[in-house]
């Protein structure tokens, strides 16, 4: 169903309203004082510019302050007819009129620069073009409205998008935490809602390191929001890596645009290869924090830190901030399951070593997306280096994670911290 002129015309109606006739020089004062009383669009509908219509009925008494204004300025109350329609209605008002009663107008959508994207439900899909056009019309700062399909089907985890209204362009500039991020929403993974999560981890790293000599290995950096922000905020040194060549392109651009060339070094390779090259001294970077924000796969890469001391000769062990999914009825069950997955790669790990456990969002009642922060344990760091055979990406655990990450009936971010005794 598309929004046509006929549909717009069907929303028009004529109604009587109370109007106030006043001297032209009083109009600005009236508009400032009684903005909430003014009928939407009335200044365009009424022919005489010294008349203002107000949104009330003849049965309702006028507010006392409005009565005083009328008396003090010798205004006259009139009855006028105004024609209202699509242009006077809000996004919700239009869709309430046009959608069937069993279909709710979508309220949740993400704004990326001048792009808005929905995750429409099955019931909403037949009306997707109507919904998209109405949103575009009612938000003048938007240029593109799209629908993101449910699953990400490629290794770079980029979305498959369907244009609903506006320009077929997905280039965007997103301001975040003092930096400007350039991206193409169709070519890279981006989630605006992770803004507060990046803020949380940056503050925690500052706390752990006393704000000094921070060197971050950002293994799944995307277009670089975390590395750029921590470089700006804490004067950190960052090695920012992503496998997606498109992410690398925008990472380079963002580094230059934000003038952090001396702090952020970009890479475009497999995350495990980055760490091995550091061990082999092909890359010179002495990190003390590892940021692993790829919930579906990040835990599988922890094995590369087994034998850290043996490979580097360093006894100062890095802090690791890793994301993943866990299932449990309470926090302790979530921590236990998350810990068991970590132990597969780091056999010396124990849940007593957890410094902070944070739930980002509820995917379902039992399944959560989490972040766990800990310091690499001495036993794993001093053990024999050896990579763990990784699980097949098509197994049920991976599929479960995939569904969890892409499930769109998620609750808002849960700012929940759990103390580990």
Image (tube, helix red, strand yellow):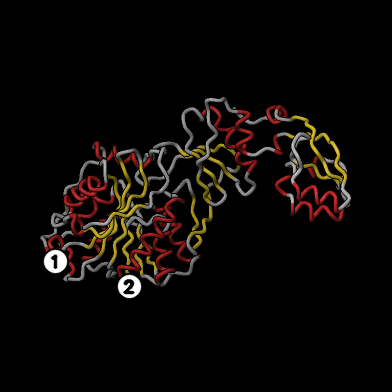
Disc 2 crowd, CA 10 A, few/some/many (<14, 14-19, 20+): few
Q: Which residue is at a point 71% across and 38% down the rendered structure image? A: 87
Q: Mark 2 vs mark 1: which is more N-terminal?
A: 2
Where 393 falls versus 248 (above or below)? above
> Label 2's element?
loop
Find residue 166 and report its image quarter.
Answer: top right
**Quadrant showing the N terminus:** top right
Q: Which mark is residue 310?
A: 1
**Quadrant showing the C terminus:** bottom left
Disc 1 crowd, CA 10 A, few/some/many (<14, 14-19, 20+): some
Identify residue for label 2: 210
> Label 1's element?
helix
Give coordinates of residue 308: x percent, y percent: 18, 64
Of the pair 189 and 55, the residue shown nearer to us: 55
Give coordinates of residue 351: x percent, y percent: 19, 54
Of the pair 181 and 289, the residue shown nearer to us: 289
Given the current orientation, which residue lies at the most extreme left position? Answer: 384
């Amino acid at each position: 169903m598309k929004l046509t002129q006929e549909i717009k015309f069907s929303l028009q109606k004529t109604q009587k309203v109370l109007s106030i006739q006043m001297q032209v020089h009083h109009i600005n004062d009236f508009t400032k004082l009684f903005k909430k009383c003014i009928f939407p669009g009335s200044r365009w509908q009424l022919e005489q510019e010294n008349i203002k219509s107000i949104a009330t009925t003849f049965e309702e008494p006028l507010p006392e302050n409005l009565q005083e204004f009328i008396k003090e300025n010798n205004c006259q109350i009139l009855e006028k007819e105004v024609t209202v329609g699509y242009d006077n209605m809000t996004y919700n008002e239009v869709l309430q009129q046009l959608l069937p009663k069993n279909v709710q107008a979508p309220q949740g959508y993400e704004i990326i620069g001048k792009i808005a994207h929905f995750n429409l439900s099955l019931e909403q899909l037949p009306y997707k073009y109507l919904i998209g056009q109405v949103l575009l019309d009612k938000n003048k700062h938007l240029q593109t409205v799209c629908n993101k399909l449910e699953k990400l089907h490629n290794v770079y985890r980029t979305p498959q998008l369907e244009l609903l209204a506006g320009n077929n362009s997905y280039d965007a500039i997103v301001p975040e935490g003092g930096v400007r991020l350039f991206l193409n929403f169709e070519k890279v993974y981006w989630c605006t809602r992770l803004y507060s999560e990046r803020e949380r981890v940056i503050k925690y790293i500052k706390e752990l390191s006393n704000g000094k000599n921070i060197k971050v290995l950002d293994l799944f950096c995307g277009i670089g929001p975390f590395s750029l922000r921590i470089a700006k905020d804490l004067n950190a040194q960052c090695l920012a890596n992503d496998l997606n060549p498109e992410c690398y392109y925008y990472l380079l651009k963002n580094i230059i645009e934000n003038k952090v060339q001396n702090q952020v070094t970009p890479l475009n390779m497999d995350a495990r290869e980055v760490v091995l090259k550091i061990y082999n001294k092909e890359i010179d970077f002495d990190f003390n924090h590892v940021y692993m924000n790829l919930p579906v796969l990040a835990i599988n890469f922890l094995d590369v830190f087994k034998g850290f001391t043996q490979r580097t000769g360093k006894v100062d062990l890095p802090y690791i901030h890793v994301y993943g999914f866990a299932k449990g009825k309470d926090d302790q069950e979530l921590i236990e399951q998350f810990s068991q997955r970590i132990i597969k790669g780091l056999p010396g790990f124990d849940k007593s070593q957890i410094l902070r456990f944070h739930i980002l969002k509820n995917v379902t009642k039992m399944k959560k997306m989490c972040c766990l922060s800990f310091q690499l344990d001495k036993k794993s760091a001093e053990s024999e280096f050896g990579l763990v055979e990784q699980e097949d990406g098509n197994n049920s655990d991976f599929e479960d994670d995939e569904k969890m990450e892409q499930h769109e009936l998620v609750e808002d971010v849960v700012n929940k911290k759990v103390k580990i005794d």
